[in-house]
């Protein structure tokens, strides 16, 4: 039905759309926050209320209405937030991940009210590789062997401990990871061979003062003294060791998958390929062919549904968190 004025017909006012209200805790300038807001508006809902991480940290909390769904977004890529969490003035520094973890998990518990889409206890485990590995392993989700997994796992105080665990667990090739790192920050893919030969592949760059910095260029260290210095600097923040499991390949490149599980169902998957052991896209990795992966899995006698089932089982270990990202490592035969 329309009304009419001297200027012509005018549509009658539509009733305001109703539906869920969202709030997002994030860095307002971040692309993830912007994309989420765009998606909410595209669904015909009111734009989400954005609560800045910097404000949460300075005010030591934030309050939400009882009917607001609260999404927690990454606090990364903001120098001021990084300084508040890690106490570092240089956002490229690798050190300080333990302090970051303590600050981040404490801040999660100062978000009051609302309907949280992520649970603080779940996130505390998801952001500690040792704890997360133990949770998955106890649930029967396949994970690489690790001597540092869980509260009873070995604690690594430096390179000498890494060497001892490599011998004890017969791991000549392994990944050394900061317990609370992300985006491959501080990760070393370590290979050893006879005659004392060693190679560590990493994005870590050592500054003239010995400080460690993240770099977009992957480099290799062949001198054990250099590797030891990096590990010794990272160790106070906590380290997690994992056996290096050879990955499948696509078009001659190492391949793995990042799978997003929402409300218990695997909904999105990205193939990541690389010429080296680190497949992160920001470190030079490339998106692979997902249809090609499905074909390879089927040709190997496995089922794509089984691949997704592994990811859904992993996400189910964190039932109070709506959305979980799972890194899936396909073994060389594409069957496991």
Image (cartoon, rainbow, N blue to C red):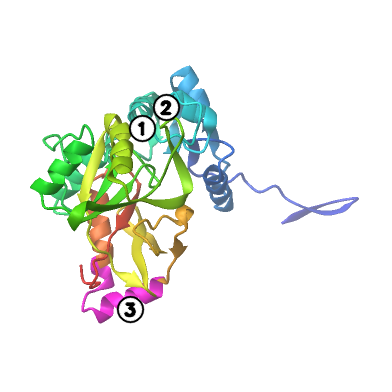
Corner quadrant of residue 48: top right
Residue 138 shows in this picture: no
Viewer-proximal residue, 225 or 205? 225
Estimate how packed mark 1 is, as few (under 14), some (14 to 19) or many (20 or more) residues with alpha carbons within 10 Å.
many
Mark number displayed over residue 68 = none
Query: Considering the numbered disc 3 on the image, is that residue within a helix, a strand or a loop?
Result: helix
Residue at 49 percent across and 19 percent down: it is 58
176 relative to 267 in the view: left or right: left
Q: Work out whether mark 1 precedes mark 2 in sequence or the reverse, and give the earlier one.
A: 2
Residue contact at pointers 1 and 2, CB within 8 angstroms: yes
Query: Is 297 one of the magenta-colored residues?
Result: yes
Q: Which percent across, then down, holds residue 336? A: 20, 67
Please give the residue where the numbered disc 2 appears in the rendered image: 86
Residue placed furthest toward the top:
59
Whole-Å distance between the Cαs marked 1 and 2? 7 Å
253 over 211 or under it: above or below: below
Viewer-proximal residue, 23 or 280? 280
**Stretch of the chain drawn in magenta:** 290-306
Viewer-proximal residue, 117 or 139? 139
Q: Work out whether mark 3 precedes mark 1 in sequence or the reverse, and give the earlier one.
A: 1
25 relative to 37 in the view: left or right: left
Residue 325 shows in this picture: yes
Residue contact at pointers 2 and 3, CB within 8 angstroms: no
Q: Which percent across, then down, holds residue 304? A: 28, 71
Whole-Å distance between the Cαs marked 2 and 3? 44 Å
Query: Is 333 one of the magenta-colored residues?
Result: no
Q: Work out whether mark 2 precedes mark 3 in sequence or the reverse, and give the earlier one.
A: 2
Residue placed furthest toward the bottom:
299
Residue at 25 percent across and 72 percent down: it is 334
Mark number displayed over residue 295 = 3
Mark number displayed over residue 97 = 1
Residue placed furthest toward the left:
168
């Amino acid at each position: 039905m329309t009304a009419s004025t001297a200027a012509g017909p005018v549509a009658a006012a539509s009733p305001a759309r109703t539906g869920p209200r969202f709030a997002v805790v994030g860095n307002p300038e971040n692309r993830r926050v912007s994309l989420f807001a765009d998606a909410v508006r595209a669904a015909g809902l009111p734009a989400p209320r954005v609560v800045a991480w910097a404000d949460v940290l300075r005010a030591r909390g934030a309050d939400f209405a009882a009917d607001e769904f609260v999404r927690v977004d990454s606090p990364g890529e903001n120098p001021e937030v990084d300084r508040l969490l890690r106490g570092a003035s240089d956002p490229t520094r690798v050190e300080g991940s333990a302090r970051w973890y303590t600050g981040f998990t404490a801040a999660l518990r100062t978000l009051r009210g609302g309907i949280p889409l992520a649970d603080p206890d779940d996130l505390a485990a998801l952001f500690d590789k040792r704890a997360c590995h133990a949770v998955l392993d106890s649930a029967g989700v396949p994970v690489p062997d690790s001597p540092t997994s869980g509260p009873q796992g070995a604690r690594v105080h430096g390179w000498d401990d890494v060497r001892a665990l490599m011998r004890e667990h017969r791991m000549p090739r392994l990944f050394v990871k900061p317990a609370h790192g992300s985006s491959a920050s501080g990760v070393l893919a370590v290979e050893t061979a006879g005659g004392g030969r060693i190679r560590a592949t990493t994005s870590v760059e050592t500054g003239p003062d010995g400080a460690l910095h993240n770099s977009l260029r992957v480099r290799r260290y062949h001198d054990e003294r250099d590797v030891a210095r990096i590990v010794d600097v990272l160790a106070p923040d906590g380290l997690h060791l994992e056996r290096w499991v050879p990955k499948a390949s696509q078009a001659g490149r190492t391949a793995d998958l990042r799978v997003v599980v929402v409300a218990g169902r695997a909904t999105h998957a990205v193939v990541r390929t690389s010429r080296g052991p680190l497949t992160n896209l920001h470190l030079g990795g490339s998106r692979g062919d997902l249809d090609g992966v499905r074909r390879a899995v089927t040709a190997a006698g496995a089922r794509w549904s089984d691949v997704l089932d592994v990811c859904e089982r992993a996400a189910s270990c964190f039932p109070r968190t709506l959305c979980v990202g799972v890194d899936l490592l396909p073994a060389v035969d594409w069957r496991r």
